[in-house]
Amino acid sequence: MRARAGPRHGDEGQISLLLVGYLMIVLLVVFTAVSATAVHLARHRLLSVADGAALDAADALDGRRFYAEVGGAGPGPDRAVSLSAASVRSSVTAYLAAAPDVEGLGGVRPVEPTGSPDGSTAEVTLETTVRLPLVSVLIGDGPLTVRVTARARARQTG
């Protein structure tokens, strides 16, 4: 007897299953790439805001501390500009209230160790939460927390 030519009945539909599997893999890669890009862009924007806040805080010196240490004579060549943790924190809070870059980041807040570790460096640490655009819709994970730190040194001109 002759064997029948043509497809075997036991293999029907196998290519559809393979295509669905490949499509799932491609979608997972796309969702992962979109989510990673969203986190990277949010971190980059937050770091830009932190840099601006640190520069602004380095320019805002603590007047009471400056005049108590320097005696009102102004900065001399051997005297450093005085920053305090309180002056840095208040400057950062004012900067965040006025900064247009903060919109779209949602909930930017200064966290420890925002302040001045040595009296001449403004250290600003900011934190925000980022919702993953596609992944959170599919699996319902909560937002990620992104934290950045920027430092700016107050220069004295003498």
Image (cartoon, rainbow, N blue to C red):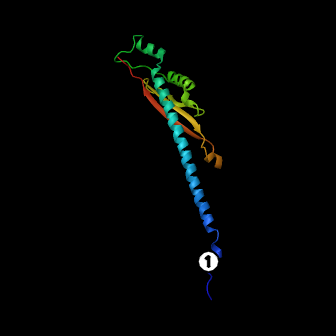
Type of amino acid at the residue the image marks with label 1:
Gly
Task: Name the outermost residue toward the top.
Answer: 72
Residue 100's quadrant in the figure?
top right
Q: Seen in the image, is 108 located left or right of residue 80?
A: right
Q: Quadrant of the C terminus?
A: top left
Q: Is residue 139 above or below residue 17?
A: above
Q: Indicate the position of residue 57 as horizontal and vertical percent values.
A: 48, 23
Q: Quadrant of the N terminus?
A: bottom right
The residue lying furthest to the front in this view is 5
**Residue identifier under label 1:** 6
The answer to whether residue 114 is left or right of residue 77 is: right
In which quadrant of the rendered view does residue 151 lie?
top left
For image coordinates 54% across by 22% down, the residue present is 90
Q: Residue at x 47, y 15 (%)?
A: 63
Q: Position of residue 49 (x, y in %)?
A: 51, 30
From the top left corner, tell me how far across and down residue 137 is, in percent.
65, 46
Displayed quadrant of residue 9 = bottom right
Give the camera-side residue of 67 and 90: 90
Under circle 1, the secondary element is loop
Q: Residue at x 48, y 22 (%)?
A: 84
Disc 1 residue crowd, few under 14, some 14–19, many 20+, Cα 10 Å: few
Residue 105 position within the rendered picture, expressed as x and y whole percent measured from the top left: 57, 34
Answer above or below: position of 9 versus 131: below
The residue positioned 59% from the left and 58% from the top of the image is 23
Task: Looking at the picture, tell me which residue is in the foreground, 106 or 17.
Answer: 17
Q: How many marks?
A: 1
